[in-house]
Image: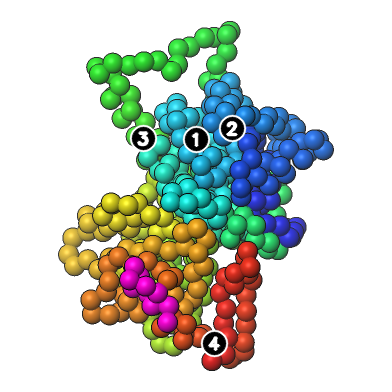
Amino acid sequence: MKMSTMDGNQAAAYASYAFTEVAAIFPITPSSPMAELVDEWASQGKKNIFGQVVNVTEMQSEAGAAGAMHGSLQAGALTTTYTASQGLLLMIPNLYKMAGELLPGVLHVSARALAAHALSIFGDHQDVMACRQTGAALLASSNVQEVMDLGCIAHLASIRSRIPFIHFFDGFRTSHEFQKINVIDYSDLAAIIDMQAVKDFRDRALNPEHPVVRGTAQNPDIYFQGREAANRFYDNVPSTVEGYMNEISRITGRHYRLFDYYGAPDAEYVIIAMGSVCDTIDETVDYLNSAGRRTGAVRVRLYRPFSGKHLLDVMPKTVKKIAVLDRTKEPGAPGEPLYLDVCKAYYSLEGEKPVIIGGRYGLGSKDTRPSQIVAVFDNLESDSPSSKISIAFGNRFSYCSESCLARWRAKSAEGASQISFSCAAKASFSFCDT
């Protein structure tokens, strides 16, 4: 398998180009390079797996791009867009339509902060979390290799399930991070796409030769039933995504699950998260376990539809306390979204349940270091862990004291000083001698 150095945006663009017939685009930081690359490749005559050059159309705004995407899908063309932050919010009305009409489009999102008290162009999950109620599936990638692999899975699963997918990864931290990765050949992807599902999708396209009525206004006697009729399609999404994860594993040798557990098989303290922080958590788990502690981490990949069964299947039976870290903030809510979903998954269990706490991290790309992950595990292991933690600043808002964290230094197994990659002039994490 060919290897190439690229960033997350290029990996997503490469994966999406294979399955895209129409790309409706509008630039917004940090997603713009995805659309730019697709446009460049189309101008060079690059072919997708169907032997076509992608038809790229730039609209007047993200709202227009989403409207064009909706219309193109209704016309029977597999359509993709790329966006982030406020741009994704402008697409929400059409996301409801695409999900309600069971249209297999994919949005690749370099997840970014929203303008609240101030604008921020940097990464977190506020934008994608604002879309979880639309009916679009949400698939999270943690690094550049996953963007390549899960980007392909998003398209394959969307076509088979008829559900639109939002494939997201952290803005700048992953979208602009360069890694040397394995590139999946288009011929391998062409061999696993469900062409019968593609044919069925095209057969359902609006056509004056066989007209149908869509987009009607419905009254109280029937609207509710129509909404509930979609349930079976969502019930099938986890197994569809899981099936394509297995197919990609067969091609690449890289194994994915809806929820991936990493750490001690008998872990008592576990952190659940999604996005780029998962790699940092895994490194920290290795360090702590080498020192005799029993810790673990769960990496969330398919966030919507949320399968509590698959989460519980990977969790160690020995777990006593869980910290769920969200990269978003919902003022006034009893907890952030992922935390509430995990609580619901455990609520249905009988018998003694683990203690579950929630926390926020990394808003506006605020760095999250191994030292801070250690503080989260220290909090879990305390007799009365704080239940609402904000990681990364030592003041009255935060459990994790920066003055304490600054004294923590991790050593590699060999005791050598190490410093890893940096992003936007901030060290992502480092191992160094005390």
**CB under 8 Å between callouts 4 and 1?**
no
27 part of magenta stretch: no
Q: Is residue 74 left or right of residue 358?
A: right
Front residue of this view, candidates 250 and 211? 211
Look at the image and give the residue range highlighted in magenta.
394-403
- Judged left or right of residue 275, residue 294 is left
* Amino acid at circle 1: Leu
Q: Are marks 1 and 2 in contact (CB under 8 Å)?
A: yes
- Quadrant housing residue 190: top right
Q: Pick whichever, 186 or 55, lies toward us.
A: 55
Look at the numbered disc 3 and give the secondary structure of its residue: helix
Query: Closer to the observer: label 2 or label 3?
Result: 2
Q: Is residue 402 magenta?
A: yes
The residue singled out by tag 1 in the image is 90
Q: Relative to the observer, which residue lies in front, 302 or 113?
A: 113
Q: Position of residue 113 (x, y in %)?
A: 49, 52
Q: Which residue is mark 2?
A: 61
Q: Which mark is residue 232?
A: 3
Of the numbered discs 2 and 3, the one sitting upstream in the chain is 2
Pointer 2 local density, CA inside 10 Å: few below 14, some 14–19, many at least 20: some
* 2 or 4: mark nearer the eye: 2
Q: Are marks 3 and 1 in contact (CB under 8 Å)?
A: no
- Dot in front, 3 or 4: 4
Residue 295: % across, % down: 39, 76
Disc 2 residue type (three-letter): Ser
- Residue 131 makes an appearance in the image: yes
**Callout 1 environment at 10 Å: few (<14), some (14 to 19), or many (20+)?**
some
